[in-house]
Amino acid sequence: MKIVLFSDDIALVRHWENSLHEECTLVDELDELYKVENSLIILNFAACELPCETILSKITRTNKVLVLHRVPDLSTAKKLLAQGAKGYGNAMMRSHFIVSAVETIRDGMIWLYPEFTSMLINEIPERENNSNLQKLDMLSDREREVALFLKDGLTYKDIAEKLDITPRTVKAHASHVYQKLSVKDRVALALLLK
């Protein structure tokens, strides 16, 4: 799946290209963007002359869209994801986040900036007497600790600091938790355990 960049900001385009280390096509006119098919489009929120939701309605039929915004906020994230965007984040985020977003979206999943994922998880209300908490018994002690921190919306980095382990180790534990509990990500885990 080829990558198409839609932006009128050359500094952003360079940042995205340098982050991705793969050939990208630059489009800077809406008419051209509407002709793009079967691509992953990275859309600069600020470059949208029309409301971003209007543009998304015309390009998400055959494309996957990652919207990047210089001043991202959770309410905009919710709105754009509801309109068909497959990802949302900071336009100037670090290269590894851009690569992660593209890989996640190519794999058919939704990508959201980690802090926003934590915010969404924190909005999920706790249920009284959640019988799903018994499923934690099938996890090792460390996996259970990680699962409970993830349920509470902590990022891998936050958990690593609390448990005095590396974020990579947290990610490995989280992967085992997701597999054992048959969930695909932090949000699904929170929905199961809250």
Image (cartoon, rainbow, N blue to C red):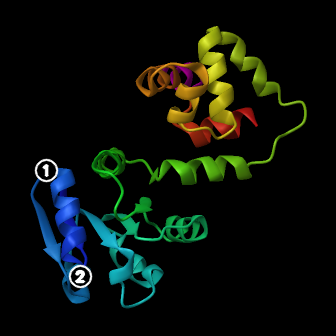
Specify few, some or many for label 2: CA neighbours under 10 Å numbering under 14, 14-19, or 20 or more: some
Residue linked to disc 1: 21
> Residue 141, relative to residue 79: is it above or below?
above
Q: Position of residue 56 (x, y in %)?
A: 40, 76
Return the residue nearer the eye: 121 or 2.
121
Magenta segment includes 116: no
Q: Which residue is mark 2?
A: 8
| Residue 115 marker | none
Q: Which residues are magenta?
A: 176-182
Residue appearing at x 21%, y 71% in the figure: 11
Residue 184 can be seen, yes or no: no
State whether the magenta stretch is mostly helix, strand or loop. helix
User: In the image, is 83 to the left or to the right of 107?
Assistant: right
Q: Quadrant of the N terminus?
A: bottom left
* Residue farthest along the left direction in this orientation: 23
Q: Does residue 64 lie above or below 94 as drawn?
A: below
Indicate yes or no whether the magenta region holds residue 181.
yes
On the image, the x and y values in percent for residue 105 come to 35, 51
